[in-house]
Amino acid sequence: MSSLNVNEISDKKMTRRALIGSTSGAIIEWYDFSLYAVASALIFPKLFFPGSDPFIATILSFATFATGFIARPIGAIIFGHFGDRIGRKNALIVTLWMLGLSSAFIGLIPSYDSIGIWAPILLVLMRIIQGVGVGGEWAGSILLSMEWGKKNRQGFMASIPNAGVGAGMLLSSAVVGLCLSLGGDSFYVWGWRIPFLGSILLLGVGLLIRSKITETPTFRNVQEGETVSKFPIADVMKQYPKQVLYTGLAKLAEHTPFAIYTTFLINYSINNYQVSSSFMVNTNTMASILLCILIPFFGYLSDKVGVKRLFMMGCAVTFVWGFVFVGLVDTGVSAIIAAVMLISMIPFCMQSGALPALASQAFPARLRYSGASLGTQIPAIFGGGIAPIVCTYLIQATGTIYSIGIYIAIVSILGFIGTSKLKSFSSGHIDSSGASNESGLTVSTLEEIKA
């Protein structure tokens, strides 16, 4: 067997490992985050903010949910720096530890009745650690998969780890649903802790898989070309500030509706209509199955029709769907609400399937971890982080759920505009002289760096 064939087989094997390793981490990431989202709607208002007005307790619980998003840019800065300096793999090992241990500790925090104010303080602290981990995890897992894949399949390869959104949600919803059915009323006393403690098992599996992955060829080319940035975050903000902004608008348009479709809708339906907690959790589980299927499908489609084009189509569909969404939810009928959540996954997946490649290709390889992290994690605060709070406030202030339709429309317009202005640095970027280089940098740029 020739050395060329051996190398091809080795690369294919490592590509599979990278795909599995990046996806497993994404599953853990979204298992933890989705678990917290469900708990912030069902559990935390009762156990950590007792005695408050239901409206205030809900706001406080969603506020702790938001702290994880506020911490995500910190993780983006920290792990973006190390991911562009020492490699994707090493940064991802640390983020996995942070996610697994912080979630498990949440399952051990006593209630407000036991330790008073320290209960919500510890909850917020663990949520911050979790948020820092997620801030570094998302871009790294995307790059680990995309940079090991073929150039003509970047959209699909980048979308697979993002399908961890669905797999993580599916796993968390299934575990919560099982604990609800088996524990009954005990779920609100101690049963809710079991899913959080289960993060330890996922952590062990994720670490085992990622330990067998080598660094991506793209980053090795950056190292061999001596173009590793000393201060990646500073370079990104200095050289590509508009790319960060436009990527942020795209992320805002993708993440805000998703937080509304899931986290807010669960809480709103339970509190305002005759809808049970178990019904909404089971609906969330079905939605998660759709995410596992549709995100890779639209990732595959993005390689055919274009990453930017597909994402902008998703923004346009979401603009229209937002008003239909609130109208159907306002019927208060359980079956319709369930159907609404499931249908909402289609426009979301159009965006979510294209976003990983869109955000990654917006920056050259030497700054890609930092750029993609900053561009997606800062707007996550205003998208997923505070969206449930904004929705709760809008309904309280306007007295109508239709104000949420306007909210969705605004972020969709911003995302459409931002995406239309994004430039692309593919892994096989071609410079003006026709020469190709794997780092996504032109020859003139390389000469400037070396000089």
Image: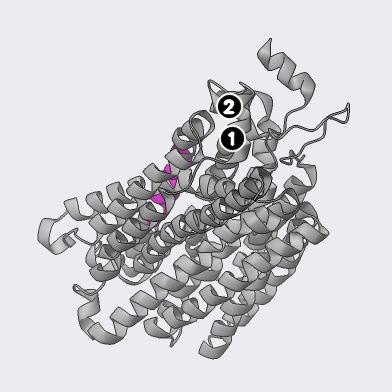
Residue 72 colored in magenta in the image: yes
Residue 186 vs 312, above or below: the answer is below
Q: In the rendered structure, are the residues bearing label 1 and label 2 in contact, judged by CB atoms less than 8 Å apart?
A: yes
Image quarter for residue 242? top right
Quadrant where the image shows the C terminus? top right
In the shown orientation, is residue 226 left or right of residue 198? right
Decide which of 61, 230 is in the foreground and name it. 230
Seen at 67% across and 16% down, the residue is 449
Residue 271 colored in magenta in the image: no
Decide which of 272, 426 is in the foreground and name it. 426
Q: Secondary structure at mark 1?
A: helix
Return the mark for residue 27.
none
**Is disc 2 surrounded by few (<14), some (14 to 19) or many (20+) residues within 10 Å?**
some
User: Which residue was labeled with disc 1?
Assistant: 219
Percent position of residue 84, x then y: 54, 32
Percent position of residue 244, x then y: 64, 37
Decide which of 127, 49 is in the foreground and name it. 127
Amino acid under disc 2: Gln
Seen at 27% across and 54% down, the residue is 123
Residue at the top extreme?
451
Decide which of 46, 39 is in the foreground and name it. 39
Q: Which residues are magenta?
A: 65-74
User: Which residue was labeled with disc 2?
Assistant: 223
**Is disc 1 surrounded by few (<14), some (14 to 19) or many (20+) residues within 10 Å?**
many
Can the viewer see residue 429 in this picture? yes
Residue at the left extreme?
114
In the shown orientation, is residue 134 left or right of residue 229? left
Image quarter for residue 104? bottom left
Q: Secondary structure at mark 2?
A: helix
Report the Cα–Cα distance between label 1 and label 2. Answer: 6 Å
Residue at the right extreme?
433
